[in-house]
Image: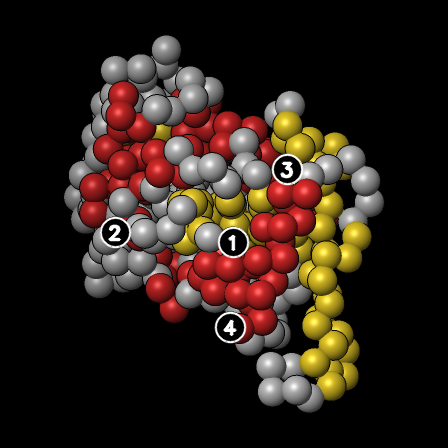
Amino acid sequence: MTSEFYRRPGSGGAGENFFRVSADTVPASMGLPPSLDSVVSGAGHSFDRAAALGSRVCPAVPVLFFGDLDAYLGSALRVVTVGLNPSLKEFPSDDPFLRFRLAENAGREDSGRYLEALSAYFRTKPYGEWFGNYEPLLNGMGASYYNGATSRVLHTDICSPVATDPTWSHLSETDRAVLVDDGAPLWHELLEVLQPSVVVLSVAREHLGRIMFDPLAPWGLIHRFDYTADGALRARPYEAEGCWYVVGDEPSLFVFCPASQTPLGLISHNHRHELGSIVADTYLRGW
């Protein structure tokens, strides 16, 4: 089982490193579905195509997911969070592979090392300031990106696995189109491999239109916060919505939580935790 090669710029050298997925290079301990090789190849293709864009962060690697894949696959409640594309802060200019150290010198046959680098993200140097926005909600579900929770969470990006500078909202329409053309189908393929129980999106509402899975019903209200955490009446209620989609052959609960400048930034940490508990109950009631 092999896939196409996928390219990563060398860390300061003149040449380039290549690696590919094969059955022999993926660690058996990760318990990976065999179809993951296609997704990894697709990530490499996205990264290569983005080389023509001045916005691609480099040196870097495509980030299919953030988090411990093995722990996620072993979780009773499989939770996936969703953003748009990786931040340029994932690859600091003074130490690009600070957060993905195992991927720094990944060579031709090192796809397993690449996947281990993604799985080690929250045990290495995560961009905690950003991911901390989701943690209270996840904790309310008995889940976390980190060790110690009943369920381990993965983060994914619906538009592209390629980090860019500038951020998504400041990219040109041309750059966005190139990235989404590869990235959106890849995200759907990845979710079919991951088979999530719950998918949480805290992005601009327009991005819900990128979801191409078959819905089982229209989007509906899960919970509404009419008041702020300190008891003040909100000028506009905060409404979290849900929709069941068929991912692979199983129903998955997709949850939309409006964002501000950051995920879930319009509600307090206590309300996020409360909402997480409500989401978990909604999932357990089932479709």
Residue 62 in picture, x, y percent from top left? 39, 42
Residue 25 in picture, x, y percent from top left? 25, 21
Say which amino acid is labelled 1: Met
The residue that disc 1 covers is 141
126 vs 273, left or right, is left
Q: Nearer the viewer, mark 2 or mark 3?
A: 3
The CA span between labels 2 and 1 is 21 Å
Say which amino acid is labelled 4: His
The residue that disc 2 covers is 123
The CA span between labels 2 and 4 is 23 Å
First in residue order: circle 1 vs circle 4: 1
Q: Nearer the viewer, mark 1 or mark 4?
A: 1
The CA span between labels 1 and 3 is 15 Å
Residue 149 in picture, x, y percent from top left? 37, 51
First in residue order: circle 4 vs circle 3: 3
Coloration of the structure image: secondary structure
Say which amino acid is labelled 2: Arg
The residue that disc 3 covers is 252
